[in-house]
Image (tube, grey):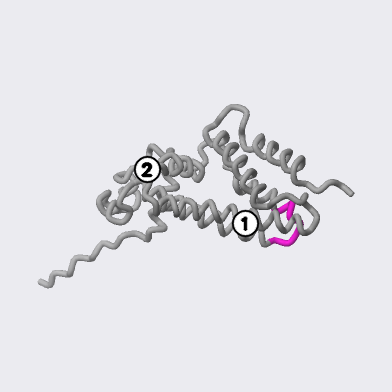
């Protein structure tokens, strides 16, 4: 009798693992994400997952980078559209803010931020690279709007730093479910701030 060779089990693509991690966070929250549970979801042992990701913090950072890659593509498409800078800036703000309470992407950001003090330097550098991409795109958009006369003559880099700080603060309020600070309220605050500080005065 011929014995067929045992089929070698192959690990799922890493993107499938990261997508499953994000889906778990979206459906059940961050506390429900465990190596054992994620392994069952994708057909891998927790030891196998640890071989690829080393720690849960690394898994979370990789998942955040994967999610940011998708958002980055969406942001690039948004900012490359034709039309006024003000309209695209509003789209940037809407993309930046959480969808609502317990938004999984922002839940990941809160976890990565909270662990960043004890994270290795390379992990902090990767986090900074993600944030830097948002910042550079915003600076470029502001500079374009200023050159077109749509925006006031602010310093694009300094204004971008302040605006992103505001967006981060409001986003935290939204994602933790602080009363009176849902997504629509946050959008209203940002739009009012932009109208008061950035919109070029009517000629």
- Tag 1 secondary structure: helix
Distance between the Cα atoms at labels 1 and 2?
Answer: 29 Å
Would you identify the image quadrant in which residue 101 lies? top right
Q: Which mark is residue 129?
A: none
- Tag 2 secondary structure: helix
Compared with residue 178, is residue 6 higher up or lower down, i.e. above or below? below
State the residue in front, 200 or 176.
200
Pointer 1 residue: 137
Q: Which residues are magenta?
A: 81-88
Identity of the residue drawn at 48% across and 44% down: 109
State the residue in front, 105 or 25.
105
Residue 94 in the image, given as x and y percentages of width and height: 64, 46
- Magenta span contains residue 95: no
Identity of the residue drawn at 34% across and 59% down: 12
Left or right of 146: which side holds 162?
A: left
Left or right of 83: which side holds 100?
A: left
- Label 2, residues with CA under 10 Å away: few <14, some 14-19, many ≥20: few
Residue 38 in the image, given as x and y percentages of width and height: 34, 47
Pointer 2 residue: 118
Left or right of 184: which side holds 72?
A: left
The mark nearer the N terminus, 1 or 2, is 2
State the residue in front, 130 or 11.
130
């Amino acid at each position: 009798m011929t014995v067929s060779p045992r089929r070698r089990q192959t690990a799922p693509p890493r993107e499938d693992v990261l997508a499953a991690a994000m889906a778990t966070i979206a459906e059940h929250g961050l506390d429900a994400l465990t190596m054992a549970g994620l392994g069952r979801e994708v057909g891998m042992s927790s030891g196998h997952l640890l071989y690829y990701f080393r720690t849960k913090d690394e898994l979370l950072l990789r998942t955040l980078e994967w999610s940011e890659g998708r958002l980055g593509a969406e942001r690039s498409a948004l900012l490359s559209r034709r039309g006024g800078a003000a309209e695209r800036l509003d789209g940037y703000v809407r993309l930046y803010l959480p969808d609502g309470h317990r938004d999984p992407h922002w839940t990941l950001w809160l976890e990565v931020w909270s662990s960043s003090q004890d994270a290795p330097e390379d992990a902090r550098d990767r986090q900074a690279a993600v944030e830097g991409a948002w910042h550079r795109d915003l600076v470029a958009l502001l500079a374009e709007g200023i050159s077109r006369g749509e925006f006031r003559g602010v310093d694009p880099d300094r204004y971008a730093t302040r605006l992103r700080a505001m967006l981060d603060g409001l986003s935290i309020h939204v994602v933790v479910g602080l009363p009176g600070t849902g997504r629509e309220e946050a959008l209203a605050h940002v739009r009012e701030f932009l109208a008061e500080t950035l919109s070029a005065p009517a000629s």
